[in-house]
Image (spheres, rainbow, N blue to C red):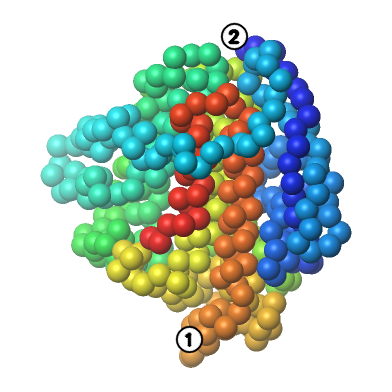
């Protein structure tokens, strides 16, 4: 049964600057115009239509910060004064992977049971990426969010069977999308190994991805919650829409960045956001708790992809497990390129022709290296992580909540 939630005023500091491009980043989501400058940080909102609004007074000069009064939408239900002098203490935060390990034991074995088929070749295709060598990043977030929501809702914190199923389903949907992406992109490397489409061919790869999605759908139906089914079905729609968005581009610079962030939400963050929301639904009936879970996943998911786009320019192929400069070779203009275009307008023509002319990829790569595109994209990722921390801090303190806070640091500092 939902409990009444006490509201209060909370204080935080914000540094704010503006440019027309980053105005677009926050404005396309209908939020107030707080943004980053070329070397600044601030509050910027990304894609998704379910954002929580934030009432913030902004500074008018670069680098200055002021105390701002923020009315939180939700706090844990206690009679104590709601005052976190510090949201968290870095030295006390638990390692997210270690904390989730118990719940993730046998995850891939359980997924293989869902994919059980008598035909040996189809089984080999479906099991190919479920070899236990993946990061299990999405399931890890899901089980931590589930336990954080359970603790917040005065439960004992233990994972419900349906919540663990959602963690498993999230990994299945993600892997199926990778199989299909590799076919679309013609990729030959994934996670340091030859892709399914290279080993078995494109037709069988597509069928394998379809089969994994069908098995995930059946597992989802067995949870028996219509709202959860609806929430996770949205993920599959977003994946398809995001892929179509990736095939196109925008002439206008501001529209182009909006398009990029919206595509990033649909292709990457939607799965994390809606999986987090789904596990919260199973334990709490309060829509504001669902929204906190969704917003944490949305912001972490967008930050994760922004860092991934940076690594395409800064990490070597051995670190990534796939060739570097992949996005440019596919004709994709990601964050570092879009920011670099502000300093090097020559990139505009290359973006519109999707780097298809001879020498485009090499020149675009050089422009990004000479620009502040990588730094600006990292600043933007930092913002999204700050917003994720703000959201998850509205839940009752718990080991899992604090681990989700630490996870934002790990997203920003990862090198592969």
Residue 265: mark in rendering: none
In the picture shown, does residue 240 fall above or below 107?
Answer: below
Compare residues 349 and 43 and report the one nearer the observer: 43
Residue annotated with mark 2: 1
Which residue shows up at 25% across the image and 38% down it?
108
Q: Residue furthest top?
A: 1
- Looking at the image, residue 214 sits to the left or right of residue 81; the answer is left
* Quadrant position of the C terminus in the picture: bottom left
Give how far across and how far down residue 267 sits, in percent: 51, 52
Residue 210 seen anywhere in this rendered image of the structure: no
Residue 48 seen anywhere in this rendered image of the structure: yes
Label 2, label 1: how far apart the Cα atoms are: 59 Å
**Residue 201: quadrant of the picture:** bottom left
Residue annotated with mark 1: 362
**Residue 69: quadrant of the picture:** top right
Which residue shows up at 19% across the image and 44% down it?
123
In the picture shown, does residue 151 fall above or below 318?
Answer: above
Which residue shows up at 75% across the image and 22% down it?
7
Compare residues 219 and 83 and report the one nearer the observer: 83
Category of crowding for the residue at label 1, using alpha-carbon neighbours closer than 10 angstroms: few (below 14), some (14–19), many (at least 20):
few
- Looking at the image, residue 314 sits to the left or right of residue 133; the answer is right
* Quadrant position of the N terminus in the picture: top right
**Secondary structure type for disc 1:** helix
Give how far across and how far down residue 361 sits, in percent: 49, 83
Give how far across and how far down residue 117 sits, in percent: 19, 37
**Secondary structure type for disc 2:** loop
């Amino acid at each position: 049964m939902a409990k009444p939630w006490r509201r209060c005023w909370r204080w935080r500091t914000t540094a704010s600057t503006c440019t027309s491009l980053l105005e677009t980043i926050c404005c396309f989501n209908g939020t107030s115009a707080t943004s980053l400058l070329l070397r600044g940080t601030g509050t910027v909102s990304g894609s998704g239509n379910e954002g929580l609004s934030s009432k913030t007074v902004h500074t008018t000069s670069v680098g200055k910060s002021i105390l701002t009064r923020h009315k939180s939408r939700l706090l844990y239900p206690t009679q104590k004064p709601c005052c976190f002098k510090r949201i968290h203490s870095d030295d006390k935060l638990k390692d997210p992977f270690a904390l989730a390990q118990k719940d993730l034991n046998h995850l891939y074995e359980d997924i293989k049971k869902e994919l059980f088929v008598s035909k040996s070749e189809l089984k080999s295709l479906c099991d190919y990426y479920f070899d236990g060598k993946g990061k299990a990043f999405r399931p890890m977030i899901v089980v931590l969010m589930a336990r954080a929501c359970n603790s917040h809702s005065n439960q004992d914190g233990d994972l419900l069977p349906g919540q663990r199923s959602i963690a498993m389903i999230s990994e299945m949907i993600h892997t199926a999308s990778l199989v299909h992406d590799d076919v679309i992109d013609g990729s030959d490397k994934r996670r340091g190994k030859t892709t399914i489409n290279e080993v078995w061919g494109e037709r069988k790869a597509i069928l394998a991805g379809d089969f994994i999605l069908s098995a995930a759908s059946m597992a989802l139906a067995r949870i028996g919650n219509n709202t959860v089914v609806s929430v996770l079905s949205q993920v599959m729609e977003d994946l398809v829409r995001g892929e179509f968005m990736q095939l196109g581009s925008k002439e206008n610079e501001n529209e182009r960045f909006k398009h990029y962030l919206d595509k990033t939400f649909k292709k990457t963050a939607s799965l994390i956001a809606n999986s987090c929301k789904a596990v919260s639904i199973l334990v709490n009936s309060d829509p504001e708790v669902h929204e906190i879970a969704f917003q944490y996943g949305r912001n972490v998911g967008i930050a994760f992809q922004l860092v991934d786009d940076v690594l395409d320019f800064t990490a070597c192929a051995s670190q990534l497990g796939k060739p570097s400069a992949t996005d440019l070779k596919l004709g994709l203009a990601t964050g570092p390129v879009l920011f670099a275009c502000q300093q090097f307008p020559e990139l505009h023509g290359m973006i519109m022709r999707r780097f298809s002319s001879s020498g485009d990829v090499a020149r675009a790569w050089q422009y990004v290296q000479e620009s502040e595109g990588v730094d600006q994209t990292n600043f933007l990722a930092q913002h999204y992580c700050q917003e994720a921390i703000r959201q998850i801090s509205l839940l009752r303190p718990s080991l899992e909540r604090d681990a989700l806070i630490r996870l934002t640091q790990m997203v920003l500092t990862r090198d592969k």
